[in-house]
Amino acid sequence: RETMWAHLKKSGIPVAELEQRARVLYRFDCAQIVSLAGHDIGLLKVCRDCEPWELSQIQLVPDRQRKGLGRILIEGVLTEAKTAGVAVRLHVPRASPARRLYARLGFVVTGEDALGYLMRCDAQQAQDGDRAE
């Protein structure tokens, strides 16, 4: 709730408890808790059993946002994807400021729907310095 509700509301995405629970449980088998100095500060969900890989969730508690941690996590995923020779895709809500970060890391918009943007990154290009600015 802390990390996403405001962005989801602005994007027209339902924020009721049931929908939130469904989002968290979607592909929970791919989830990793992000910890820093012994404290749980977020969630990273990368589904690596499909091609392209799906970055389905990245959330950091508000006091840890805008400190470069999201960038580090995503760059780690892109490094893994480059080694595996696969691209990475994601869906970002329309009102999410994370879209700018994804673009800086090499993700490009490949489509859109009523709720947000579909983005994809060819990890090889992103890691070779061809990042969109």
Image (spheres, rainbow, N blue to C red):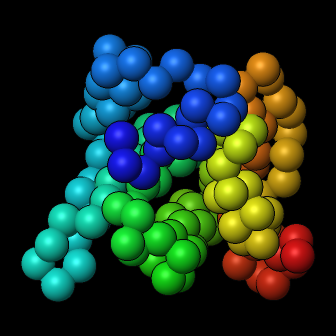
- Nearer to me, 94 or 131: 94
Give the left or right position of residue 124, taking residue 23 as reference: right
Report the residue at 76% width, 63% height from top.
100
Report the residue at 86% width, 33% height from top.
111
Report the residue at 75% width, 48% height from top.
120
Q: Position of residue 79 (x, y in %)?
A: 56, 73
Q: Position of residue 41 (x, y in %)?
A: 27, 66
Q: Is residue 111 above or below residue 3?
A: above
Q: Quadrant of the C terminus?
A: bottom right
Q: Position of residue 44 (x, y in %)?
A: 38, 54
Q: What count of labels does the image hold?
A: 0
Report the residue at 86% width, 39% height from top.
110
- Nearer to me, 93 or 29: 93
Let me know if residue 68 appears in the view. yes
- Nearer to me, 37 or 120: 37
Q: Position of residue 105 (x, y in %)?
A: 72, 71
Q: Is residue 117 above or below residue 68?
A: above
Q: Quadrant of the N terminus?
A: top left
Q: Which quadrant of the figure has residue 114?
A: top right
